[in-house]
Amino acid sequence: MLAFLLRRLVSLTVTVWLATIVVFTVLQLVPGDPALLMLGINAQPDTLAALRSQMGLDQPILTRYLHWAGGLARGDLGVSLTYARPVADLVAERLAVTLPLSLLSLVLSTMLALPLGLLAAARRGRGSDWAVLGFAQLGVSMPSFWIAILLILLFSLTLHWFPAGGFPGWSAGVGPALQALVLPALALAVPEAAILARVTRTAVLDTLGEDHIRTARAKGVGRMAVLLRHALPNALIPVATVLGLQISFLVAGAVVVENVFTLPGLGRLLYQAIGQRDLIVVQGVVVLLALFVVLVNALVDIACALADPRPPATGNGGAS
Amino acid sequence: MPTAKQRLTLAAAAIATAALALAAASQAALAQPRTDLVVGMALEPPHLDPSAGAAGAIKEVTYANLFEPLLRVDADGRLVPGLAERWSVSEDGLTYRFSLRPNAKFHDGTTADSADVKFTLDRARAAESVNAQKAYFAPIAQVETPDPQTAVVTLSRPDGLFLFHMASGDAAIVAPESAATNKQKPVGTGPFKFDRWVAGDRVVLVRNPDYDGAKPKIDRVTFRFISDPAAQVAALKAGDIDAFTLFSTYEALPEFRNDPNFTVMVGSTEGETLLSTNNARKPFDDVRVRRAMAHAIDRQTLIEGVLYGNGVAIGSHFPPHREGYVDLTGLYPYDPARAKALLAEAGYPNGFDTTLRLPPPPYARRGGELVAAMLAEVGIRAKIEPVEWAAWLEKTFKGKDYDLTMIAHTEPLDIDIYARPDYYFNYRSERFNALNDELNRTQDPAKRNALYGEEQRLLAEDAVNGFLFMLPSVTVQKANLSGMWVNRPVQANDVTGVSWK
Amino acid sequence: MKRRLPLSLHLGAGLTLLLVAMALLSLLWTPYPAEQVRVIARLKPPTAAHWLGTDHFGRDVLSMIMVGARNSLAVGAAAVGLGLLGGVPLGLLAAALGRWGDEAVARLGDLVFAFPAVLTAILLTAALGAGAINVVVALALFNAAVLARVARGAALAVWRRPFVGAALALGRGPLSVTLVHVLPNIAGIVVVQATILFAVAIVNEAALSYLGLGIQPPSPSWGKMLGDAQTHLFTAPLQAVFPGIAIALCVMGLTMLGDGLRDWLDPRHRSSGIL
């Protein structure tokens, strides 16, 4: 077990290190000079040179990489070229939007998916089963940004229940802030819930066929009690695994959905930073996201290994 | 004895009376004029130091509100006192004497005096300066401070536009104590001071109680940044925003015009929107091709399609609201057949393939799509290439590596760009250069206007670029708000004169 | 033994064929030229003349959706096709080589998976420019990584089977074993995965075109249509509905086809699929 953990840790570190090289290299290809962007069309060559040296862009590529990667290793993400603030501060600020958004959508999707999956399993083959399966098929087929537009159309523009976009900040109070997060969280949660409902249904059906459930039924335990006390807890393991694997999907979805709702989250920071050629921010955020995805995948692997004594598989499915 | 029905009516009447009284009371509360203001903007500034960045949004938040240059430009484009209450120019046009307001203070409590003026101007023209308009400061030979209230600026050569340049946001007076941190915590001398910045959402300024000049009526102004059109409209309708400036969701304007709670103001900007053309590159080096394109573009349809009719067509590089303007919009009427004939004459009977590079603003992305469709009608197949600003600046503006692009030139009185040898149009005309030299030597306004007219005519005849329309300055605001600027002589959201009726 | 074809296979194949037919039809005929601009007739609700209304430039939405189907399917097919060409040989190679070769392919996969596909595409289009081709490249990269992993896993299972040992004992080389025994045996699972990836590619292309990074005008794309419609939500809300339905139907058809294929090829796997 220890050897497995160690191997996982090493491969994780290598992956993240390779990721920093890939990100840095790709960003060198991005056309556009951050200094020119900042100073506009009347900027003079000497002003541009002054700003470039202030930004550290006059150094050779390798020096810049080493400087940046060295900072990363010490936990220093550097200073944003546009905002002139530490990237770590910017990220922390934006996480205050993205983290609650992701958590809210996780909660919403499990709250939707578990009862639906359970219902479908309990009434297998009947009307409600078909209804849940239909919802699931529909949910996985609708891109989250389209769901987001439909939600805006219905709940913001027609019913005026929620704002169509923007974020008032947590300083405006928990109420208004949460209100601004409900629609985006829902847009992310629906496709997620669809997948989870399917997984829940399958997992519950699988456990229902197992011996100890049959024994419990034979002992006269009620159908509902069997479902809730025996089948559901056992089904939670595969559900949690899928949930973990879907997290990187959630990250990607958040990038797009934050742009639909113009939420000042990490995804929007990244998208804007690309537009502003704020390479330090782009590098930092992308590597953090990669680190996060890799960590979650590793945790899922380890959890699976702990739950399952058989030798672990190297693969862990796809990320989206 | 009242019947049950009568009692019900009575009760209803009582409730109605109470409700009326309540409504009246709340009406009275509403009648109390508000003292805060929420202004909507599409773009968020990257930082708040106008002396270190070209982004328009920086000035739209800080100009005249938070930072003051020596002089200011007012709503009508005139020069008015800023930090300097008086100024004088010597006969030879080389010495400028500025008398500062005696009690002016920075928001951190330090005095604003001639030493700060010297610091600001010297910093802007220093070798390590990162001022976006460093050229504005190039004529300065030296800055002297005979006393704390007087700054004397000596130029090395006369510069007719020097005062206008000293009134730009790039020349905002800053203090040595705070210059380094203005990007995040701006400290100026204006009637409003910085309160907070919720990144991605808003910047809040509050009235400066120690301001030594006329105090604004508004005690708090919030700039909210909403880039999404649907969210802009929703925020206005919900009453979350009092005024949205440079509003570009034109399709929503009829709705606001029909709503008595809103006023829609359509003013002018200095932004000539062009189909910029690489005059050095084949086939655009042939004037017949450029004229064919001019005939192929239906400006009225373009204005309708992109601006929903809220724009003025132009026929050359000059804004219709300025003196010296010549109407040349009739020179190339929309005529696809004539366009095709000209193309055939130039040797392109079957048209040709080209690329149209589009920067991010909606007028460019949408307008470009429409222009490409119009060009396609006459056989010019333009492949659309959307780029971000950074790539546009690098490849198109600086690298001059492009065929066609669409962009609004927002600097005031910038017709002289056609005389610059290294400008991205790659236009070279001895005649234009001669006209421009003569203009620089001419002081008489009437003669200057005549020269401007000749320049416009020449550019139109050469069909240097596709001259499309003036970008409008649209403000949607609550009907009971007054004092917002209608026109945009400079990039600013000066709210010092705003009040509630 | 004759197995009953799963219902989802029928439905999925039907839906997919319908969309492919629509895309093919658009090559020959659309109600109006999809790129024809008529500003006068913009943002019209559905009428007899324009069944799905017109967009903000007065273009016929039905025609645009038909041509959009062609564009979406082409991008998806290219992204999956390239993914198959790159990924399957890599997976087979990893399985055949074992040890460090296997490890290298696995690490390469980890690296690709560390970046969500949409993020990779955003970065690549920033570096190389927006446009359909660069989106195809980015999505193909992701698809290749997934398919390599799937092919490797399936191939390893085949390598453990007795007849492979027999073939090796008969003196067959690894290449011949791979081509003759492994490839045919993993084809099914690879096809299933490719179908699902096709659906994912359609969604991702739509998202990128929505952001303005994908298929470029004048060629219509479903995602770009949604992006344009979002700015007209007040005046023409239906324009934000039709292209979305097209995306959803396309994705639904392909996922059901994939699920159905899987159930049909591997009946034990049943029940996880839909319908």
Image: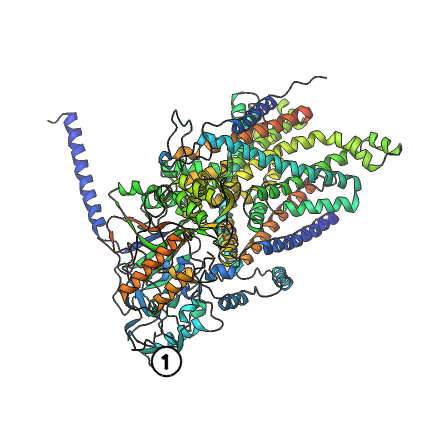
**Disc 1: which chain?**
B
Residue at screen point 59% across, 32% down? A199
Q: Is residue A187 above or below residue A59?
A: above
Q: Is residue A235 above or below residue C129?
A: above
User: Residue beneath label 1, please?
Assistant: B144
Q: How far across and down, in percent of the image, does residue A2 sit?
A: 73, 49
Mark 1: give few (<14), some (14-19) or many (20+) Cα within 10 Å: some
Q: How far across and down, in percent of the image, does residue B369 sit?
A: 45, 42
Q: Is residue C138 left or right of residue A6?
A: left
Looking at the rendered image, the quarter that the C terminus of chain A falls into is top right
Q: Is residue C21 visible?
A: yes
> Nearest the camera: C49 or C258?
C49
Residue at screen point 27% across, 65% down? B445
Quadrant location of residue B372?
top left
Q: Is residue C275 left or right of residue B321?
A: right
Q: Is residue B210 above or below residue C83?
A: below
Q: Amino acid at mark 1?
A: Glu
Quadrant location of residue C229?
top left
Residue at screen point 66% across, 54% down? A17
Q: Is residue A163 visible?
A: no
What residue occupies the far right of the structure in this picture?
C170
Q: Is residue B168 above or below residue A102?
A: below
> Nearest the camera: B491 or A309?
B491
Q: Is residue B15 left or right of residue C91?
A: left
